Image (tube, grey):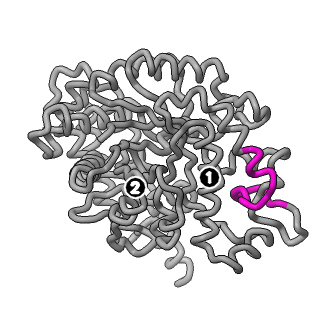
Amino acid sequence: MIRAFQWDLARQVERLDWLLAQLPRYAAWGYQELHLHLEDAVDYPSLPGIARADAYSWSEFQTLVERASAHGIRVVPIANLLGHTQYLIKTPQWRELNEILLPDGSPAAVGQICPDHPRSIEVAEALIRDLTPLCTAGKLHVGLDESFHLGKHPWSQSVIERIGLPAYFAAYVTKLNDRVASAGLQMGIWADMLIMLPEAIAELPTGIAAYDWYYHGFKRHPRFELFNFQEYNLAPALRERGIDYWACPMNGAFRHEPLPVFGERLANAVAWWQRGQKVGAAGFLVSSWEPSHLSPELTTVIDAAIAGLWLEGESTDHATLLRRGFERATAVRHPAQASRLALAADEHAFASYAQAERHQHWDSSPLHEGVARAAATARFCQRAVARAEFGPLRVSLQWRHYLAERERFVRHGAKAILRARRLWQRN
């Protein structure tokens, strides 16, 4: 299996010098490819106006690719061309591509591109043209994940009514692949739409790569959250169709978490590594998403820990993997202690959208639980901060401590407010 890692530059633009400094480390850990999720993080020569204010210049992006190549790491750009194309829709010059229309027939300000809009292929060809020289792995990933708005535009709707959604999706994949293959590249797509549209697999072009992803631990097969965590298995159908299969865990967090849930990340990686070996996967990609709430040094520790699956290979337990990850990625004197502390923090994880809702709605807190749990987490974090040798872990625990104290304050204050309301009603 090809061993790859990903940086989500679309959601967090890191300093270029920091990125460059990581490349020799990842090469030493045995990673062979770097996937770069881009969206509007790069100033594309053929698409002026797309890049956001803090985007990398084209020359900076070229420097990143060149330095990766110098360290033996091949690059796969990810240019979303269906779902997650808000980076195009947000701009006035490309808003007309939107699949979603307002009642007056004008394009909405948010959405995804419509495959049947004639300019959609125009923008795809521009991205392919710009990125081809930088596809040093010989691959271009076009995304296509979470494309839930298909069929909302009258143009796409009329075609889908005639041929069906699976055939429509497969036809668009084929259209894109014609352009990517003409550039001499293999095309990659995320595989989640194939779980929802399994009939599309038989109509996909052979020779592409499908990246299968699921971000929790599993024993036999991955599960699909939108199908109530039902097991699925795409590998046999993709292999029969001549499509490369990639196994994809995640190293980070679900949007709002101040710390990775370290044990869960490693369980997820181990499950995918073992599955990849079992089904003969072409590659293993440690993906990274929305890291802006996290210290990138901590996701780097997880990447270094995951590398133990091929560097040592004899151990898959979380404590050993994470200890070795701290040894590789940091200069801490006591990596075993750092590993134990990180895994202990999992028991006090700030995870789930329900907890994050407290940012906006204090009364979403489960007030019946009282303040004891939040107080216990606050005490743990206070002790953990004092013990944390690794700076990024210490700072992240300080943030977690603040969130616990805030939760305690909210629950205590909310309880007092409810008591005051009852007293007022009695009077």
**SS category of the residue bearing label 2:** strand
Task: Using the image, tell me which numbered label, if any, was put on residue 213.
Answer: 2
Calculate the distance from the C-alpha at mark 2 to the C-alpha at mark 1: 16 Å
Q: Is residue 116 magenta?
A: yes
Residue 416 spot, x, y in % from top left: 46, 66
Q: Earlier in the sequence, mark 2 or mark 1?
A: 1
Amino acid on which the number 2 mark rests in the picture:
Trp
Amino acid on which the number 1 mark rests in the picture:
His
Task: Using the image, tell me which numbered label, if any, was put on residue 382.
Answer: none
Q: Residue at x 29, y 60 (%)?
A: 372
Q: Which residues are magenta?
A: 107-123
Q: Residues within 10 Å of mark 1 (few under 14, many from 20)?
A: some
Q: Residue at x 45, y 53 (%)?
A: 210
**SS category of the residue bearing label 1:** loop
Q: Which residue is mark 1?
A: 84
Residue 28 spot, x, y in % from top left: 28, 22
Q: Are marks 2 and 1 in contact (CB under 8 Å)?
A: no
Which sits in the foreground, 13 or 411? 13
Q: Is residue 376 visible?
A: no
Residue 335 spot, x, y in % from top left: 17, 28
The reply, left or right, for residue 241 in relation to residue 118 is: left
Residue 191 spot, x, y in % from top left: 46, 58
